[in-house]
Image (cartoon, helix red, strand yellow):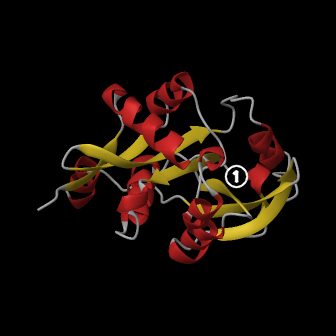
């Protein structure tokens, strides 16, 4: 019986993360392989390390082998990405729950990648819920983007996870959808709860 676990990535996981990234990056896939989702961007080992040491990368393992990951990073982390810059440029005019994205304390959700043979097992929801719990109380909202040409991923995030589509933008003739979700407030610690009860 397999043993699936969710946790934060450590340095020994980087090789597996890079392997999954390469196997699912859009330029490395045949057209029919892209129908089940793809990654629009690639990160270097240094960038993976930077994200993992800051907000963290959530990984899912099966019998100790990394089979999926979900990144999180701050808006001010400069990766030199034209797509990220294009999304950030919309923050003053795109609205979520009646306020511009600029007015929220937010982080960037993604990229997320699950091995092709491991999909449809509920792992995306597990990664998402683990990340939100880990970042609870630190941000108001998470912001994601998905290529319009990636309907599999768009469906998984909007319909599957309940993220709200708030707008879109274009970079190099590719359209991207902006998705937003609430991050829960930090749950009180057991120590704080015991003080309230006393």
Outermost residue toward the top?
46
Q: How many marks?
A: 1
Q: Secondary structure at mark 1?
A: loop
Of residues 101 and 69, which is closer to you in this image?
69
Image height check: is 76 above or below 198?
Answer: above
Q: Quadrant of the C terminus?
A: bottom left
Q: Quadrant of residue 155?
A: bottom right
| Residue drawn 61% across the image and 60% down it | 34
Q: 10 Å neighbourhood of mark 1: few (<14), some, or many (≥20)? A: some
Q: Quadrant of residue 150?
A: bottom right
Q: Quadrant of the N terminus?
A: bottom left
Please say whether residue 93 is visible from this viewpoint.
Answer: yes
Name the spot of residue 52 as percent of width and height, x first: 45, 32
Residue linked to disc 1:
104
Q: Is residue 76 left or right of residue 126?
A: right
Name the spot of residue 61 as percent of width and height, x first: 28, 49
| Residue drawn 78% across the image and 69% down it | 98
| Residue drawn 57% across the image and 48% down it | 111
């Amino acid at each position: 019986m397999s043993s699936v676990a969710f946790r934060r990535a450590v340095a020994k996981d980087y090789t597996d993360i890079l392997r999954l990234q390469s196997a699912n990056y859009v330029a490395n896939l045949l057209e029919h392989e892209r129908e089940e989702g793809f990654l629009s961007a690639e990160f270097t080992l240094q960038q993976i390390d930077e994200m993992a040491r800051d907000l963290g990368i959530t990984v899912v393992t099966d019998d100790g082998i990394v089979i999926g990951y979900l990144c999180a990073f701050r808006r001010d982390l400069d990766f030199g990405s034209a797509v990220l810059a294009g999304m950030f440029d919309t923050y003053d005019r795109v609205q979520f729950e009646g306020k511009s994205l600029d007015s929220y304390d937010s982080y960037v959700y993604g990229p997320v990648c699950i091995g092709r043979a491991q999909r449809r097992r509920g792992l995306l929801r597990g990664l998402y819920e683990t990340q939100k719990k880990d970042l609870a109380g630190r941000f108001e909202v998470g912001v994601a983007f998905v290529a319009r040409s990636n309907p599999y991923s768009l469906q998984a995030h909007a319909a599957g996870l309940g993220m709200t589509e708030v707008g879109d933008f274009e970079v190099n003739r590719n359209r991207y959808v902006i998705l937003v979700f609430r991050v829960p407030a930090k749950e009180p610690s057991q120590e704080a709860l015991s003080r309230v009860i006393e």
